[in-house]
Amino acid sequence: MHPMSTTQTERLFEEAEGYLELELPAPALAALNKISEEVREERAFVYNSLYGEALRILKQYDDAAPYFAQAIDERPNEVGLYINLGWCLKRSDRLDDAIATLRAAEQACRKSNDMKSLALVLYNLSCYYSLAQDKDQMLGCLRSALALTPAFKVGIADESDFDPWRDDEDFKSLTSTKS
């Protein structure tokens, strides 16, 4: 078998990205599986992030998590990867790992002064702490997220992760849409 040209390889990566934009993970995986092991190693960040995303869309969260973790190893400042990894860990019943992952994302955001991403990370952390029944951490993260992005308040009513706290006075006070 002859080695793939750079053009062919780039085409496969672009094909996979296109399929993922269309939420078609199976053909994306098929394209990625055609890429040689050597190129997978050379382009580990792109390969792992795309492969992880395809598996995440397929709801194969346990399988997706290691790909996101490897992509984070390549580019530790890519906050979206932490969010995707946390998403997968949460859905794999690994809530403590999901929280630790988003705490690492929080540090990456603070280090790069990325306040927009920090707000999203803190909002997700508040959801995870809610599920972990850690009221103080949940309220603290949610308060910080809302301070950075007040518009998040609109989605709280529809966020099932907060259901255990709907009748809690502190939660109601923080999330009330009346000002």
Image (cartoon, rainbow, N blue to C red):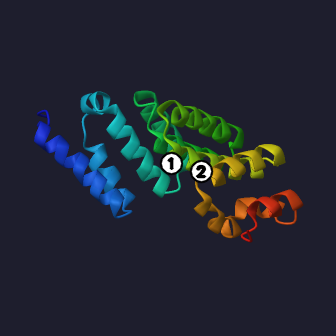
Tell whether 77 sits left or right of 130. Answer: left
Tell whether 28 sits left or right of 177. Answer: left
| Tag 2 secondary structure | helix
> Can residue 91 be seen from the camera position used here?
no
- Determine the residue positioned at 82% across, 64% down: 172
Query: Which of the two residues, 172 or 11, is positioned nearer the viewer here?
Result: 172
Query: Which of the two residues, 93 or 99, is positioned nearer the viewer here?
Result: 99
> Can residue 117 be seen from the camera position used here?
yes
User: Measured from the top left, where is residue 75 in percent x and y?
Assistant: 41, 31
Q: Dot 1 surroundings within 10 Å: few (below 14), some, or many (20 or more)? A: few
- Determine the residue positioned at 22% across, 47% down: 12
User: Measured from the top left, where is residue 44 in percent x and y?
Assistant: 34, 32
Residue picked out by circle 1: 116
| Tag 1 secondary structure | helix
Q: Is residue 159 above or below residue 36?
A: below
Q: Is residue 162 above or below residue 44?
A: below
Residue picked out by circle 2: 148
Q: Dot 2 surroundings within 10 Å: few (below 14), some, or many (20 or more)? A: some
The residue furthest front is: 179
- Determine the residue positioned at 57% across, 32% down: 107
Q: Which mark is residue 126?
A: none
- Determine the residue positioned at 71% across, 64% down: 160
Q: Residue type at mark 2?
A: Leu
User: Measured from the top left, where is residue 108 in percent x and y?
Assistant: 52, 33
- Separation of marks 2 and 1 at Cα, in angstroms: 7 Å
**Label total for image:** 2
User: Measured from the top left, where is residue 103 in percent x and y?
Assistant: 63, 36
Q: Residue type at mark 1?
A: Lys
Check whether the beta carbons of the residues at disc 2 and disc 1 lie within 8 A of each other: yes
Query: Which of the two residues, 151 or 16, is positioned nearer the viewer here?
Result: 151
| Among the two numbered marks 2 and 1 on one chain, the one whose residue lies closer to the N terminus | 1
Q: Quadrant of the N terminus?
A: top left
